[in-house]
Amino acid sequence: MKNKLLCALALLGLGLGASAEPMVAPTACDRFVHKLPNMGKPLCQQAELVDSGARSVQGTPLYMRDVGEDNARLRVLVIGAIHGDELSSASVAMHWIRLAADEKLDLPQTVHWRFVPVLNPDGLLAQPPKRTNARGVDLNRNFPTPNWERDSAIYWQKRTGKDPRRWPGPKPISEPESRFLHDQMQSYKPHLIVSIHAPYGVLDFDGPSVPPSRLGRLYLDQVGIFPGSLGNYGGVHKGVPVVTIELPNSMRTPLDSEMRQMWIDLQRWMSARLSSEGAVAR
């Protein structure tokens, strides 16, 4: 009787083992490839995004990719999808990773690129996608600009009419996503930040240096400074130039040729301004 019981338990164990499949965590491409416009799986895999170790409110990894030598003279941080409903911004960042890895322009300074294509994965993966993160915070109003507690509340209440899509949050860098970007600015120490948005179809700029007059078909049209914004915090308060790209459409990317021209124009401006004006020394 004892032997029969042991055999039955062994067979049961084998059956359970055969039917149970190991849990495999989804990759960045599993999460994003079917969500983003103009984004095939080969391009996503070629981006070789890595888990930064940071997590969103809902526990989604914040992925990144470094391209270039660690000891390069210029460090450039490229951010996409700080607003989750601006899907095209993440796609352009992914296309630029390929260009950064494949193309070598004749620049006077070597460049170390750091890409964070999707800063707000919870907003991007929501159905439908939403501007804010999972706690309803507009991440681009959550950075610790001077007098944030007073100015951000006044702006949100009086200028936006308490628009829930633009709520700055309960306090500066209250969100894991904005804290991650804040920490990146402290540790990586970029000489330039490029933040990709949509859908206003213009080019904005904050901080020192002469701004680029155009990138591809986007022309400079500085739209102002907002409490808690990345441009205000990085460009005005910290003195790190912030180029803000507003793509024309949040659901469609520009043509591949236009994305490449924007990339070339950005590097030409970097070569003409950041190097000659001593941004590296600053």
Image (cartoon, rainbow, N blue to C red):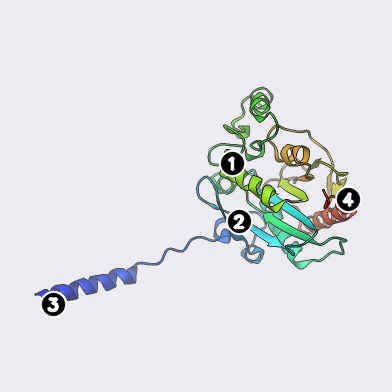
Residue type, mark 4 in image: Arg
Q: Label 3: how many residues lie within 10 Å, few (<14), some (14-19) or many (20+)?
A: few
The local secondary structure at tag 3 comes to helix
Mark 3 highlights which residue?
3
Residue type, mark 1 in image: Lys
Q: Earlier in the sequence, mark 4 or mark 2?
A: 2
Q: CA distance from mark 2 to mark 1?
A: 19 Å
Q: Label 4: how many residues lie within 10 Å, few (<14), some (14-19) or many (20+)?
A: some
Q: Which mark is residue 63?
A: 2
Disc nearest the viewer among 4 and 1: 4
The local secondary structure at tag 2 comes to strand
Q: CA distance from mark 2 to mark 3?
A: 53 Å
Q: Is there any visible trace of residue 225 in the rendered image?
A: yes
What residue appears at the point 76 percent right and 67 percent down from the top-left corner? Answer: 102
Give the side of residue 16 with respect to residue 176, left or right.
left
Q: CA distance from mark 4 to mark 2?
A: 30 Å
Q: Earlier in the sequence, mark 3 or mark 4?
A: 3
Q: Is residue 157 above or below residue 181?
A: above
The local secondary structure at tag 4 comes to helix
Mark 4 highlights which residue?
273
Q: Earlier in the sequence, mark 1 or mark 3?
A: 3
Mark 1 highlights which residue?
130
